[in-house]
């Protein structure tokens, strides 16, 4: 339930009134009130803004405690904990005194309705991929924004002690990149469900 209203799984535009609208319900006169594109599935309830961040994941490679770390994609794609991954990554960087650029910038991002951002997990990226055409259509309708920008997007799931997973929207595939590599990130947010 969101703001007293039930919503089925699917793709929506989240408006500043914290209600979700389908493509057919959306009025482009509301575009200035669009928070992001929301996706509701059995595994995730997230919102994606029309925002892209560019930076390295971290100032150094390390093992992040409390974060899924695996070279097996079948295990990694079951990680739907981007928010807790991001929180654990930031907590460890503060304790060990190093910089986690992408996690800090995504966590500092605030949606126009007050939701805080985080680095999505690779499982959250996979869930979005199953709805790619609809997400692209809604991003275009409300924001005139294209998620794909020719580079991978960071995920908060670790591949190993030197690399993190990334997601290529254009080719719909995961890759691993060294944590000091610079690439894009799109902060996700958790929907404020009751």
Image (tube, rainbow, N blue to C red):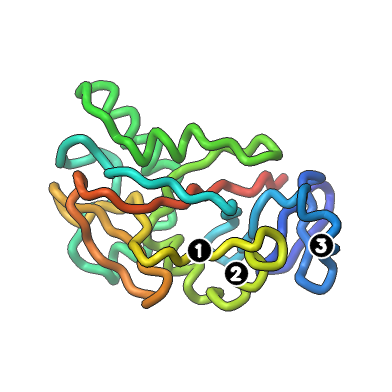
Number of marks: 3
Direction from residue 55 to residue 137 in the image, left or right:
right
Identify the element where label 3 is drawn: helix
Res 135 label: 2
Q: In terms of image quadrants, where is residue 90?
A: top left
Measured Cα–Cα span from mark 3 to mark 1: 19 Å
Helix, strand or loop under label 1: loop
Is the C-beta separation of discs 2 and 3 under 8 Å?
no
What residue is pinned by disc 1? 147
Q: Are marks 3 and 1 in contact (CB under 8 Å)?
A: no
Tell me if residue 111 comes above or below residue 191 in the rendering.
above
| First-in-chain label (3 vs 1) | 3
Measured from the top left, where is residue 106 in percent x and y? 45, 40
**Disc 2 or 3, which lies upstream in sequence?**
3
Quadrant in the picture for residue 142: bottom right
* Quarter placement of the C terminus: top right
- Residue 44 spot, x, y in % from top left: 54, 59
Q: Relative to the observer, which residue lies in front, 44 or 159?
A: 159
Residue drawn at x 58%, y 36% as measured from the top left: 110
Q: Where 131 sits versus 29, above or below?
A: below
| Residue indicated by mark 3 | 28
- Residue in view at x 27 percent, y 44 percent: 56
Q: Secondary structure at mark 2?
A: helix
Q: Are marks 1 and 2 in contact (CB under 8 Å)?
A: yes
């Amino acid at each position: 339930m969101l703001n007293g209203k039930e919503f089925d799984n699917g793709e929506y535009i989240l408006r500043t009134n914290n209600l979700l609208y389908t493509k057919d319900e959306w009025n482009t006169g509301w575009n200035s009130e669009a928070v992001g594109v929301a996706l509701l599935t059995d595994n995730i309830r997230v919102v994606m803004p029309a925002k892209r961040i560019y930076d390295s994941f971290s100032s150094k490679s390390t093992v992040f405690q409390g974060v899924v770390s695996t070279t097996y994609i079948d295990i990694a794609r079951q990680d739907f904990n981007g928010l807790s991954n991001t929180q654990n990554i930031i907590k460890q960087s503060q304790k060990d005194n190093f910089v986690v650029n992408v996690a800090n910038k995504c966590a500092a991002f605030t949606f126009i309705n007050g939701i805080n951002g985080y680095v999505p997990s690779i499982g959250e990226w996979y869930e979005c991929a199953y709805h790619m055409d609809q997400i692209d259509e809604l991003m275009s309708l409300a924001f005139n924004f294209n998620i794909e920008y020719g580079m991978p997007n960071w995920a908060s799931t670790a591949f190993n002690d030197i690399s993190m997973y990334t997601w290529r929207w254009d080719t719909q595939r995961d890759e691993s990149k060294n944590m000091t590599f610079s690439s894009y990130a799109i902060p996700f947010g958790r929907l404020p469900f009751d």
